[in-house]
Image (cartoon, rainbow, N blue to C red):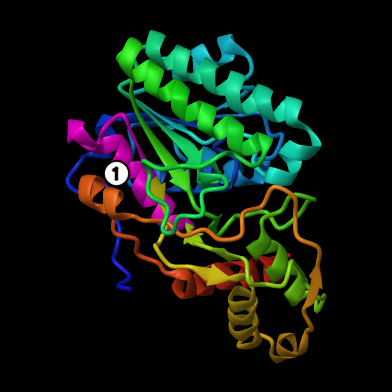
Amino acid sequence: MTNYSLPYHGDKELSNYSFLVTGGAGFIGTNLVEYLLKYGAGHVRVLDNFSTGLRENVDRFFLHSNFELIEGDIRDYDTCEMAVKGMDFVLHQAALGSVPRSIADPVTTNEVNISGFLNVMLASSKENVKRVVYAASSSTYGDSAELPKVEERIGKPLSPYAITKYVNELYASVFADVFNLETIGLRYFNVFGKRQNPEGAYAAVIPKFVKQLMNYESPVINGDGSTSRDFTYIDNVVQMNIKAALTDDLTAVNQVYNVAVGERTTLNELINLLKKYLAEIDPQIGDVQIKYGPERAGDIAHSLASIDKAVRLLDYQPHYNIAQGLQEAIHWYAREQQAS
């Protein structure tokens, strides 16, 4: 897979546009803000309540005069209305992720992911935002056994989290039809990369495994390791958000897209790649043993995306496959560990 160079916005002049990134102190949001500031967006505003996002993620952005932070919660409508005011585009990343967290606390997951989403959409409609690009989820495919996953065919959701993300898509469709608000949903497939937090009970598998291996601790794989995912490096996700926001092709709007690479990797293959790349930095990591535990409730066995629709309508070109993305991520985590 060719590693193309930035930028992703083509000949569009970002200085002409203002962007709100909800959840802009989180993993994906931070990378979006970084891109927008790097390429001179006219105004970049972040709305975050720091429930899962990190303050240190946004501290460095204050060096930019065109950056603004609103500390607030998407569950408060007035806050949402204030945040979207004057914005051309909303990149809605704020949510409570994690299937296990939604099973442990479905009420809060519902409040944030559905009520909060509705607030953002309604405020965007009232304040005449041009377009809302929102984080959807591959969990929406639920119990569908079809591979690869195609946007038009989904299954039964298997967790409260999956239900909330599907409801987001339904609301977006209604706002497009009834309120004339342009929307694009991006079904993320197992995103990983720089600034993904390895801490906490609901940490994503790649940063968690990386941290454990770097500390010579044995990672625990849920199940026998045959579970597979379409792991997607963060820069591919940034590309899709930017292209979705700025496309002039109206046939591409009011749609939902898979954001992935179109390649499937088992957890056993993943851990072997991690050990291989980390051992190049620290040979002792190659000797760390892997453990296996019970399968996790609400998980699907296999996930693989068709990206044909995104390629066709948004000119999506994933620049990083799993190997390239892991190498980028591992070098970032290694630098972070050295700095601390």
Q: Position of residue 31 (x, y in %)?
A: 49, 49
Residue at x 27% of width, y 32% of height: 253
Query: In the rendered view of the protein, which quadrant contains the N terminus?
Result: bottom left
> Is 139 located above or below residue 193 in the figure?
above
> Is 120 located above or below residue 13 in the figure?
above
Residue at x 39% of width, y 13% of height: 125
Residue at x 48% of width, y 68% of height: 264
Label 1 crowd bin: few (<14), some (14–19), many (20+), radius 10 Å: many
Q: Which residue is mark 1?
A: 243
Q: Which residues are magenta?
A: 234-257
Instruction: Answer with left or right where residue 329 lies relative to residue 153.
Output: right
The answer to whether residue 253 is visible is: yes
Q: Position of residue 106 (x, y in %)?
A: 74, 30
10 or 110, which is in the foreground? 110
Residue 242 lies within the magenta run: yes
Instruction: Answer with left or right where residue 223 lies relative to residue 20.
Output: right
Res 54 quadrant in image: top right
Instruction: Answer with left or right where residue 281 lies relative to residue 22.
Output: right
Query: In the rendered view of the protein, which quadrant contains the C terminus?
Result: bottom right
The answer to whether residue 63 is visible is: no
Q: Position of residue 137 (x, y in %)?
A: 51, 42
Q: Secondary structure at mark 1?
A: helix
Residue 18 lies within the magenta run: no
**Magenta region's main secondary structure?**
helix
248 or 84, which is in the foreground? 248
For the residue marked with disc 1, what is the amino acid?
Answer: Lys
Res 95 quadrant in image: top right
